[in-house]
Amino acid sequence: MKCLLLLFSVTAVCAASVLEYPIPSYKEGDRFFYFPGDGDDTMHLVDAEEPADLAFIEEYTRNPANNKYWLYTRANPNSAQVLVPGNAGSVTNSNINFSRNTVFLAHGWKGNGENTMNKMLVAAFLKNDNVNVIVLDWSELANRSYTTAKGGTAEVGRGLGQFVNWLAGLGLSYDSVHLVGFSLGGHLVGNTGRETGSKIKRIEALDPAGPLWHLDSNRLVRTDAQYVEVIHTETTTLGYSDPCGDADFYPNGGNNMPGCLIGDIKCSHSRAYEYMAASVENNSLLAQECGSLRDASFNTCTGTPLNPMGNSDINKSRTGIFRVNTGRNYPF
C-alpha cells in the first residue's frame, strides 16, 4: 500500500491500486508542479519562477565537448567508446561504421548516459539491427534545477547538432541519422536537427516535456528534421499535449497508460521510451489514424490499424494523428 502526503491539500491518500498526485493537471503559467527525475525516478517539486543559472548555462554550453558522446555497436554493446568532438582519431579508431544508420539518444532532466532509458534503447536498437548508437550524456547540466536544465536544453541540442555536422565532415550521412530524445531530450533533439539545417532523416520525440515549453520558440516542431514523430504518453502534466510533429501518436489516448496506477504520471511519462524500445524490437504497436486529437483521446478513431508507432525505420513518412491501444506489460 502506498501513501502520499498531499502538499497542496489537507489529506493523505493511501491506496493499493490508485495513486493520486497532489496537484491538478499542469497548465502553462502555473508556478508549482511536480516533475520526475529521469535518472532517479523521484517526483521533484519545481518552482517555475526559480531563476535559471544563466552563468552556468553559458559556461557549460560554450564548449560542446562538455557533453559526453558514447558509442555502442554490436562489437561493443556494453562498453562505450568515447567520441571526442574535434578529435578525428577518436572516431577513426572506434567501431563506428558510417555505412550503417546512426542513432543518437538524449536523456531528460536529472538523467545521465547510463540511466534506464538509455540502457533499454541501446539494447533494443542493437538487437534490431547492426547500427551505431551514440548516447549523449549532458548530465552535468541536466542535474541542475528544472529551470536551469530547461534553459540550457536548446543550446545543448545545438551543440549536439554541431557534433553531427562535424561527423558529417568525416563521412556520416544525414540521411542515416535517427535522433531519439525523451522528455527535455525531445526538445533537445529538435534543436539538434535545426542546427543541421533540418537535414536529419528522422527525429523521435518521446513524451517531450510540457511545462514551460508551450510559448518557447525553441520547442520541438515538425520542420526540425525531414520527418518528426512524437509519442505522447502523459499529456495532463509532464508531456507536451498538442501535436508537434509530422506524425503524433497518442497511445491509449495520451495519458493513464495501462499497467500504471491511476494518476501515476511518472509511470505514464516513462512508458514513452518503454513503448519505443518494444517497437524497435518487435514493430508490433500498430496505430489507427484519427480525424482529430479529440478522436485520439476518446478512442473514436476509425482508421485501419496499419501505421506502426515508433520502430527503427529511418524512412517513415506517414503523417497525421494516431492512436494505438497497448497492453499493460512489456512488450505491450
Image (spheres, rainbow, N blue to C red):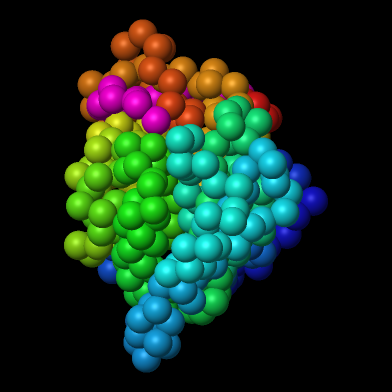
Looking at the picture, does residue 92 appear above or below residue 294?
Answer: below
Image quarter hosting the C terminus: top right
In the image, farthest residue toward the right: 1
Q: Residue at x 59, y 56 (%)?
A: 93
Residue 319 counted in the magenta span:
yes
Q: Residue at x 62, y 36 (%)?
A: 126
Q: Residue at x 31, y 11 (%)?
A: 302
Above or below 321: residue 257:
below
- Taking the image as shown, residue 252 lies to the left or right of residue 7, namely left
Q: Say whether residue 233 is visible.
A: no
The location of residue 109, given as percent across then percent down, is: 51, 65
* x then y, percent, for residue 107: 52, 57
Task: Where is residue 67? Give x, y as percent.
Answer: 49, 70
Which stretch appears magenta?
314-327
> Furthest residue to the bottom?
55
Give the mark count: 0
Closest to the observer, 158 or 111: 158
Q: Is residue 279 visible?
A: yes
Q: Is residue 267 magenta?
A: no
Q: Main secondary structure of the magenta part?
A: loop
Camera-nearest residue between 190 and 29: 190
Give the answer, above or below, for where 229 lies relative to 71: above
**Nearer to the camera, 192 or 273:** 192
Looking at this view, is 43 or 152 the one in front?
152
> In the picture, residue 246 is in which quadrant?
top left
Can you give x and y, in whole percent of width and height, for residue 48 in the image?
38, 76
